[in-house]
Amino acid sequence: MKKLVFTALAVVAFSAVAMAKTGEVKGSDLLSYEDTDCVSETADKMDCLDPENKLSAEEANKIYQILYNNCIGAGPVNRLTQG
Amino acid sequence: MKKIFLILVTFVCLTSFSQVSKGKIIYTININADENVLKSDNMGSTYSEMSKKAGTFSYVLYFSGSKTSFQKENKLNSRESEQDRMISDLASVMFTTQYNYYFDFKNKYMLSEIEGTIIKDTVKPINWLINSESKLIDGIMCFQALSQVEYLGRDNKTKFKKIVAWFAPSLPYSYGPKNFYGLPGLILELTENRTTYLATVIDFKDDIIDIDFPKSKTVSQEDYTKKVRSN
């Protein structure tokens, strides 16, 4: 009997704690991490640096690798999004 | 007549033996940055940093007998951040060179060293067009020579870049910055694309200069070019 009462009280207490401070979240406040598209971003940067395609293939490969590694190393971008 | 001939031969021999065959030349860098790229929203500031950084680089040409070496002067900077290193690497690739060059003109071969890879090739003549343009560089009379270099562009099209060199016949060494050579005088200034290499220190030496060629395994220029193109 004692065990039954204790178990019932524990369930009630747990439910109360679980439902505490539950409220509606506004869509405009959601914050999410988005993976950066490093391939596109690096390609854009390459076109900005060398708009007339004057770089050699070897130079372009090296510059691309440096910029791409920098983009990857920067990690996902913290962006505010609509919920 | 015989006496005059002997005197002339002696004079020529003396002048030949008195020519210094060792020296060190330091080239500083001047960048003519592309205004359109400087103005771009995306990469303008990065490009500006790159061009300024390249302007701080200096390269050393050592020559001793028929051997030469050309490499970047290392300036130790322990405070360099990761961002600074990235800018420095970008500047090297875009404006100057990441290669070290070694020439053995007697045995007609050259080594280009980059990131541990050593590429061996034969020394080939460069087609220079010497014209009558002249100017003084640090008080030394120099003449202009033009050439062009063929390369594969990033759009896979064959392209040519113009090379403008100013050489000093009064300095009878057929060497210059990077992998440019073969003029009847030391190259004191050379412009390739937006980069100008300018000799600012010319130091002829009496003591021995050891030019240490890298001794690791080499790859042929053909194999290295194939590897770059496959990337």
Image (cartoon, coloured by chain):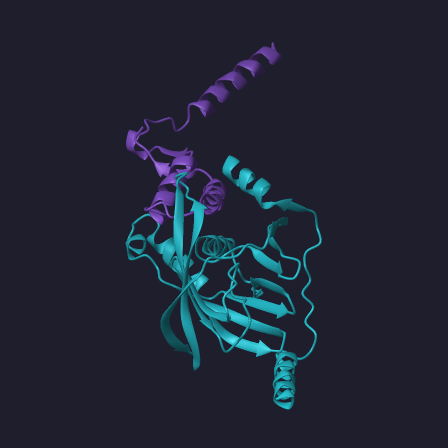
Chain colours: A purple, B cyan
Tell me if residue B88 can be seen. Answer: yes
Closest to the observer, B54 or A3: B54
Dividing the picture into quadrants, the one containing residue B141 is bottom left
Task: Residue at 46%, 41% (x, y): give it.
Answer: A68
Closest to the observer, B165 or B100: B165
Q: Which corner quadrant holds the C terminus of chain A? A: top left
Residue A16 position in % (x across, y down): 45, 22
Closest to the observer, B109 or B92: B109
Asked if B206 appears above or below B151 in the picture, the reply is below
Residue B144 position in % (x across, y down): 40, 68
Task: Residue at 46%, 23% (x, y): give it.
Answer: A18
Residue A46 position in % (x across, y down): 38, 44
Question: In the visual, does B113 lie left or right of A14?
Answer: right
Dividing the picture into quadrants, the one containing residue B175 is bottom right
Tell me if residue B138 can be seen. Answer: no
Question: In the visual, does A29 lie left or right of A14?
Answer: left
Q: Residue furthest top?
A: A1
Q: Which corner quadrant holds the N terminus of chain A? A: top right
Residue A63 position in % (x across, y down): 46, 47
